[in-house]
Image (cartoon, rainbow, N blue to C red):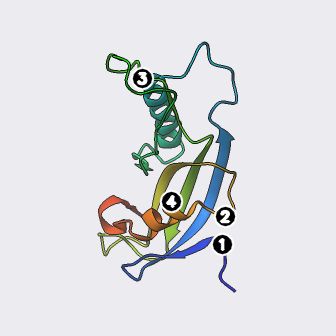
Amino acid sequence: MAKQNIIELVSGRTIHLRFLEQSLVYEEPIPGIPKWEDSQRFVERVLERARKHSDGYAPYLIPPPERPIGDPRPPFTQGSQPMLLPPVVCVARFYSHYEASDPSKDYSGLAVLWFQDEFAFPIDPAVMKHLRELDWERHAIDYDY
């Protein structure tokens, strides 16, 4: 039986989920109808919070699917299109027992942020596909014990 906290990447590397924080995107009421710019601001706030918990390194964002609300034909200006994000935001930290790029380091890690329709587990299949195809060597940070 596969463990839910272990993911094998298509590269053959195994990563381990060590931290997962989830919350509702629309937990607090927002005035009016959410728009594209509201979604972008929310994503930026979550990225900044995740960066603080990742030793200042930028987390990897799996781009969220945006869902237009209503008829997309009216003449909306940039940023005014009513838009929803999937309702659950997930911030995770993954680790590998091996370095990503610096052979003098002991292990590597990466914070990943994504959105999905339900609380995990399971992780949304589209997100899991993206995780498995992740270029770990490009995005992960190397660490010493």
Mark 1 sits on what residue? 4
Q: In the image, 113: left or right of 30?
A: left
Instruction: Pick whichever of labels 2 and 1 is earlier in the sequence.
Output: 1
Instruction: Pick whichever of labels 3 and 2 is earlier in the sequence.
Output: 3
Instruction: Pick whichever of labels 1 and 3 is earlier in the sequence.
Output: 1
Mark 4 sits on what residue? 127
Instruction: Pick whichever of labels 1 and 4 is earlier in the sequence.
Output: 1
Mark 3 sits on what residue? 81
Q: Secondary structure at mark 3?
A: loop
Among all residues in the image, which is located at the extreme bottom? 1
CB under 8 Å between discs 2 and 1: yes
Q: Report, in whole angstroms, how far the alpha carbon at label 1 lies from the one at label 4.
A: 14 Å
In depth, the one of 66 and 114 nearer the eye is 66
Q: In the image, 22: left or right of 52?
A: right
Amino acid type at circle 1 is: Gln
In the depicted structure, whether residue 37 falls above or below residue 114 = above
Q: Is residue 145 visible?
A: no
Closer to viewer: mark 3 or mark 2: 3
Mark 2 sits on what residue? 122
Q: Secondary structure at mark 4?
A: helix
Residue density around tag 3, few if under 14, some if 14–19, many if 20 or more, within 10 Å = many
Q: Report, in whole angstroms, how far the alpha carbon at label 3 lies from the one at label 2.
A: 31 Å
Closer to viewer: mark 4 or mark 3: 3
Residue density around tag 2, few if under 14, some if 14–19, many if 20 or more, within 10 Å = few
Amino acid type at circle 4 is: Val
